[in-house]
Amino acid sequence: MEKDSTNSTSTLSDFGYQQQLERSLTLKDLIIYGLIFMVPIAPFGIYGSVVSSSQGMIALTYLIGMIAMFFTAISYGQMSQAFPIAGSVYAYAQRGINKSVGFLAGWMIILDYIFVPSLLYVISANSIKSLLPGIPVWIWLVLFIAMNTIINVLGIEFTARTNIVFLVGEILVLIIFMAFGLWGITHGVGAGFTIKPFFDASHFNMNFVLTAVSVAVLSFLGFDGISTLAEETKGGNKTVGRAILWALMIVGVLFIAQTYIASLIMPDYNSFKDLNTAFYEIAFKVGGSFLQYLTTIATILAWGIANALAAQAAISRILFGMARDKTLPQILAKVHPKFKTPYISTYLVGIISLIVGLIFMDNVGVLSSIVNCGALTAFLVIHISVVYYYVIKNGSHHFWKHLVSPIIGFIIIGFVMFNLDPLAKEIGIAWLIIGIVYYAILRMTQRNTSLDL
């Protein structure tokens, strides 16, 4: 009988599992992992498109995004406290609702996580082309994937130490940019300090707010990856939830600060030569070639190594969790005898990343749409899981955490889903149908209780 986790602290054995992965991660490690996953300097690479769609109010856009994702972060925290096991939304929906819903939730999050590393590798490899045009892009793709796969197999502690190095580097680059930016603004660059990046009455309307939510929410994808490390975390069931909220708030403040300064340096968002390199134009304006190259290289390393490293670790844990329950080939649940990592799953993600990266090398837009659809579907399911498990199954009276907050989060994510690119929704529906067919065949051909409702 499954333990009721609403009023007590559960252990892995309460859910019928043995401790196979090494518990070595602290709250600090999880926060660092979440920050790396969301990339503290992410606006460097997408600044142009976001400032254009937000009509210059880019700081407000990220503020709205942080508030919007706060509700989803609360739901992840509640489910991770109830079910401190690997698998993220797969495990939460499986245990919180039933195993069929859990499988489909896991199937949809695979659509997100299995393609995230590929997307990051492709963006970074293509970015290097502007600096080193003589080297074929596919070589960088192979190098990034090989390095990250080896680091992830060597152990989660090794991955955590690598994350710290990259996070420190990203923060240092961010500090340097902000210092140059503030010096430039106070010495006549741009239009001086103004609240327009937060509010411009001439362009503000409800359509803007709704558009901003859609853009900003997608910028915060990745904080949920913290939940995949639940079985490698020490400190109790609440650690994962705390880490998710801390990581979201910290990265939100960093996003707002850097985009506010950037928008003051070049307030006319229609003057950029190329929206894809808009941030580097801003860096050049206040710091010359030094700052332009520094921010470009930092973006390449942050996306192609640090962020992809975290993404590869996350999806390998989801595959591990599903394989352990026999809903995916059991070989994916094999743990390395020395490093205590799901190494077969990690190798598989590396291979898939290479194949997908080569296929979508020149079509980043489609790949991005696939990622967004999978993630947002999983977010919808996590909100449903909170209400169903806590309120319907266990009669919780904590209505803010277990009813109001997840309903608000569901509405926000539902709106973003509705406004996704039509191609993304078509791919998502096709993937869901494939998952339903696969699961039906699995239930007909395997007689094992892990597939029971």
Image (cartoon, rainbow, N blue to C red):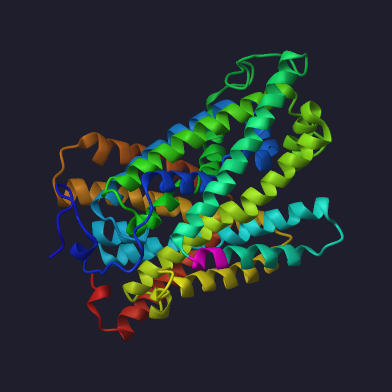
What residue do we see at 30% from left, 58% from top?
Answer: 93
Q: Is residue 133 left or right of residue 63?
A: right
Q: Quadrant of the N terminus?
A: bottom left
Residue 436, by quadrant, is bottom left
Residue under the point 58% across and 52% down = 306
Above or below: residue 123 compared with residue 289: below
Front residue of 212/288: it is: 288
> Looking at the image, which residue is at 64% across and 69% down?
354
Name the spot of residue 305 as percent of width and height, x first.
Answer: 62, 55
Residue 141 in sight in this render: yes
Is residue 163 a member of the stretch shown in magenta? Answer: no
User: Which residue occupies the extreme right position in the image?
Assistant: 134
- The structure residue drawn at horizontal position 23% and vertical position 73%, both measured from the top left corner, is 452
User: From the viewer's perspective, is 273 left or right of 351?
Assistant: right
| Whether residue 425 can be seen here | no
Residue 336, image quadrant: bottom left
Q: Quadrant of the C terminus?
A: bottom left
Q: Main secondary structure of the magenta part?
A: helix
Compared to 184, does 327 lie above or below?
A: below
Number of disc labels: 0
Residue 12 placed where, x, y %? 24, 62
Residue 302 locus on image (x, y percent): 62, 48
The stretch of residues the image draws in magenta is: 150-154
In the shown orientation, is residue 255 left or right of residue 12? Answer: right
Q: Position of residue 373 (x, y in %)?
A: 51, 54
